[in-house]
Image: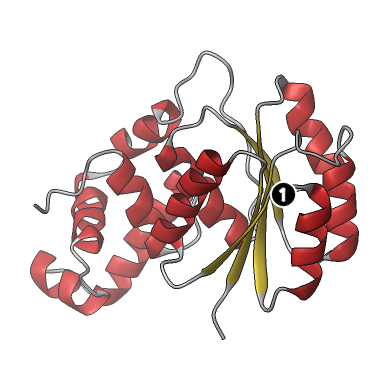
Amino acid sequence: MSETILIADDHPLFRQALALAVGQVLPRAKVVEAGTLAAAAHAATVAENLRLILLDLKMPGAVGYSGIAMLHAECPEVPILVVSSAEGAAAAEEVRAFGAIGFLPKDSDLGEIERAIARALGGQPVRAVPAGQTPLDSIRREVAELTPMQFKVLLAVLEGQLNKQIAHALGISEATVKAHMTAIMRKLDVSNRTQAALVARSLGLDLRH
């Protein structure tokens, strides 16, 4: 059964942008769109294998954080990622208080949205980037702190190599490759190889043409 992602936003073009981001993270996912809170609530109740809800706070039928509360009540096990134009750190804290897994401003770039979707799907909290800091600044710093061998392992993952292939190419054991991958994922704050690859690609590290 294919996984379903619900996008609840009253702007069709932004729904398309979110659908594009979902397609990069879960290419086979079924995307269901809703332009009002009532439509989103109905879609959430009938969707099969619903994995994630992407929600705008400011949409018809919603007052304040009521959208989060309603959808969380309908689907308490499904993570809700708020992608909204609501401003300030207070909004980010409030959405989590009402049951959302995290908050992103609508002006986040596509790579940041993709990483947030991947984290939310993995059950990891999503935090907005502090004001004055570009979405990739903190990740660039983490990548810069990778050891030369860790960087080589990350590039090999980008090429689609398995641990056995990486070990052979770099002249190290598979156990060492796994240890490097664990360190890489910890530094990049991701939970699997796919998410690590998404982060690397967002930084322009994918050298394939």
How packed mark 1 is, by other alpha carbons closer than 10 Å (few <14, some 14-19, many 20 or more), is many
Give percent across and percent down for residue 151: 23, 48
| Quadrant occupied by the N terminus | bottom right
Give percent across and percent down for residue 90: 79, 24
* Direction from residue 93 to residue 148 in the image, left or right: left
Query: At numbered mark 1, what does the secondary structure look like: helix, strand or loop?
Result: loop
Q: What residue is at 84 percent from the left and 53 percent from the top?
A: 38
* Direction from residue 10 to residue 166 in the image, left or right: left
Does residue 99 show up? no
In which quarter of the view is residue 4 placed? Answer: bottom right
Q: What residue is at 74 percent from the left and 65 percent from the top?
A: 43
Q: Nearer the viewer, residue 39 or 75?
A: 39
Give percent across and percent down for residue 102: 69, 43
Give percent across and percent down for residue 74: 87, 64
* Direction from residue 63 to residue 127 in the image, left or right: left
Q: What residue is at 56 percent from the left and 43 percent from the top?
A: 12
Q: Amino acid at mark 1?
A: Ile
Q: Nearer the viewer, residue 190 or 19?
A: 19
Please name the residue that numbered disc 1 is placed on: 101
